[in-house]
Image (cartoon, grey):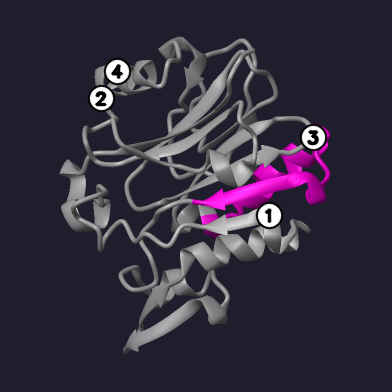
Amino acid sequence: MDFIDYSHFFNNTDLTSLISFKEKNYAIKKNRDDFVVSLKFDPKQIIFPNQTHSNNVKIIDSKNTYNKTDGLITTTQNFGVGILIADCAPIFLFGIKTSHCGVIHSGWRGAANKITTNALKKFIAAGNKPSEIKAVIGPSIDKCCFEIGEDIARNFSSKNLILKKGSKFYLNIKNEIYDELISASLSMKNIYRDSHCTFCHEDKFFSYRREGVSSGRMAAIMKVNSK
């Protein structure tokens, strides 16, 4: 199983933090379970929500089902969290002092409705100071390929829009999310932006914009390994 490993950025040897490549479609539960097992975790330990492009973020408890949810936070080593991705940005959050983990699924709807800000508010309320939170913005469709119309563009900062022609723009969604992180007082040195564009790199990533409804999904997973 192949993936991009961000664990080194968080500087915690007990942490697993990664996103898969397009080796298999991880929207299929068996494929996802096989991938989780390859990471030496029990599939029951990694909780995935039912994503709907909402701005809802939940801290997991004893339940295993989270409907209409696009971000999960875990404050325990008993469970890890995961999301499925195909062009939308995965955001990984980690509490340096608490070892709390969060994964957020943010497309343009999530970014327009500030899902990352919602997640950070919950992260801070759970006991994490902004200066003690690290974040990774993972692979997503990038400003080279993310064409949107004027109706969607009005939701975003003009500095993150590139005029194409007429009423069409390219959106820099990674920068929009980065601005949310900075607005929440995270330190620039504690934020990493992956430069991969999921649309451009057809050999590595699924892309809903490129492939349509038949597109598969990558899995983004975060868990502190139990000692």
Nearest-to-viewer mark from 2 and 4: 4
Q: Position of residue 65 (x, y in %)?
A: 49, 17
Q: CA distance from mark 1 to mark 3?
A: 13 Å
Circle 1 crowding by C-alpha within 10 Å: few under 14, some 14–19, many from 20: some
What residue is disc 2 on? 28
Image-based side of 115 in relation to 5, left or right:
right
Report the amino acid beneath label 1.
Asn
Circle 3 crowding by C-alpha within 10 Å: few under 14, some 14–19, many from 20: few
Q: Are marks 1 and 4 in contact (CB under 8 Å)?
A: no
First reached walking from the N terminus: tag 2 or tag 4 = 2
Image disc number at residue 34? 4
Question: Which structural element holds mark 1?
Answer: helix
* Magenta segment: 111-137
Give the residue at x 28% y 30%: 1
Q: CA distance from mark 1 to mark 4?
A: 32 Å
First reached walking from the N terminus: tag 1 or tag 2 = 2
What residue is disc 1 on? 190
Relative height, residue 76 to residue 161 (above, below): above
Report the amino acid beneath label 2.
Ile
Q: Position of residue 78 (x, y in %)?
A: 61, 13
First reached walking from the N terminus: tag 2 or tag 3 = 2
Question: Which structural element holds mark 2?
Answer: loop
Report the amino acid beneath label 4.
Asp
Question: Which structural element holds mark 3?
Answer: loop
Relative height, residue 195 to residue 1 (above, below): below
Q: Position of residue 226 (x, y in %)?
A: 61, 14
Q: Are marks 2 and 4 in contact (CB under 8 Å)?
A: no
